Amino acid sequence: MVRVRRRARPLLTSIVLVAVLGVSVSACGSEPTIKSLAPTTTMTLGRSHPVPGGRVSLAVRFDQPLRSGTKPVWFLTVSNDGESSNLTFSSGQRGEVVLLAADGSEVYRWSKERTFIQVVTNEAIPTGDSLVYELGDTELVAPPGEYDLVASVLATPAIPPVRQKVTVEAD
């Protein structure tokens, strides 16, 4: 599943989110169910890169710990701190997350066994705005251990990928 979210104003987004959560909880008529197997913390990694007309940064966020056999959700955030910019995508795929073993072999790829519409699209990122691409619903099948995470947005102009060591724990 790929979801695209645009963040225009953080305060307005927070207010709307609180209102929606309040309505959702009150509409349920019972206590909300929260599924949690273990305590998690959110890990955010990022790197900035200038693109023509702006300063765009990429960050990846996900819940820790990463566990084999689960379906992590990856949030790729492209933020614009410069002039308005445009990103061009050559397909419906917006982002990618890959885990590489120490020898460079690939042990996980978010897009594996997925297909994407082949269409060229442009997305504008106004000054001070962000785009969030949510990548989920792919099982993490990797033995416990340390891996190199490579997260990228597949746009032109190219934004260098985020690279970081991560640990996958046993399920």
Image (tube, rainbow, N blue to C red):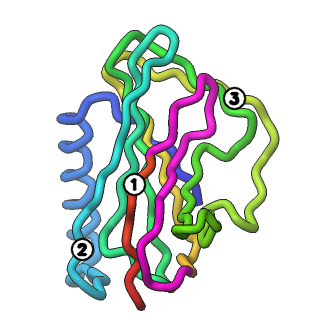
Q: Amino acid at mark 2?
A: Thr
Which image quadrant is residue 154 in?
Answer: top right
Q: Nearer the viewer, residue 6 or 150?
A: 150
Select label 1 or label 2 by which is in front.
Answer: 1
Q: Crowdedness of circle 1 by 10 Å Cα count: few (<14), some, many (20+)?
A: few
Q: Name the spot of residue 111 as percent of width and height, x first.
A: 66, 60
Q: Which residue is mark 3?
A: 121
Is residue 159 covered in magenta? Answer: yes
Q: Choose between 65 and 84: the one closer to the eye.
A: 65
Task: Classify 10 Å Cα crowding around label 3: few (below 14), some (14-19), many (20 and above).
Answer: few
Residue at (28%, 65%) from the top-left corner? 24
Q: How many labels, in total?
A: 3
* Disc sitting over residue 40 in the figure: 2
Query: Which quadrant of the figure has residue 63?
Result: bottom left
The image shows residue 99 at horizontal and vertical percentages of 54, 64
- The quadrant the C terminus occupies is bottom left
Look at label 3 and name its amino acid: Thr
- Side of 66 relative to 13 (left or right): right
Q: Quadrant of the N terminus?
A: bottom right
Q: Magenta segment, which residues?
A: 142-162
Please, what secondary structure does the residue beneath circle 3 have? strand
> What residue is shown with label 1?
164
Q: Tell me: residue 113, above or below residue 121.
A: below
Does dot 1 land on a helix, a strand or a loop?
strand
Q: Label 1 to label 2, Cα distance in Å? A: 19 Å
> Disc 2 to disc 3, how far (Cα)?
35 Å
Dot 2 alpha-carbon crowd within 10 angstroms: few under 14, some 14 to 19, many 20 or more? few
